Image (spheres, helix red, strand yellow):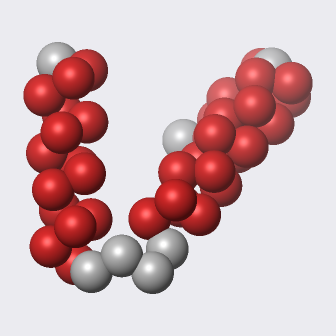
Amino acid sequence: MIEAVEKKNPELAKRMRDVLDGNCARLEGLSPAAVDFSKEVAILLYC
């Protein structure tokens, strides 16, 4: 998905990668249950 955005807007793609990297770093080291919980919370907040 980011690759498709990059073709049209490289700066937006860079920001998307930065956000994705930050999110992955926050989830690193958490248990699978904690990761699943954080996904559920995100879905509730953004839907």
Residue lying at 75% horizontally and 31% vertically, measured from the top left: 15
Quadrant assignment, res 13: top right
Q: Position of residue 2 (x, y in %)?
A: 63, 41
Q: How many marks?
A: 0
Q: Quadrant of the C terminus?
A: top left
Residue drawn at the location 15% of the way across and 56% of the way down = 37
Q: Is residue 47 left or right of residue 4?
A: left
Q: Residue at x 27, y 65 (%)?
A: 35
Residue 24 lies, in percent from the top left, at 53, 61
Quadrant of the rendered structure where residue 12 is? top right
Farthest-out residue, right: 11
- Residue 43 can be seen, yes or no: yes
Q: Where, quadrant-wise, is the N terminus in this rendering?
A: top right
Q: Nearer the viewer, residue 15 or 37?
A: 37
Q: Is residue 21 left or right of residue 29?
A: right
Picture coordinates of residue 25, whole percent (x, y): 59, 63
Q: Does residue 10 sit above or below 40 in this rendering?
A: above
Is 18 situated above or below 28?
A: above
For image coordinates 53% across by 51% down, the residue present is 23
x then y, percent, for residue 11: 86, 24
Asked if residue 27 lies left or right of residue 39, the reply is right
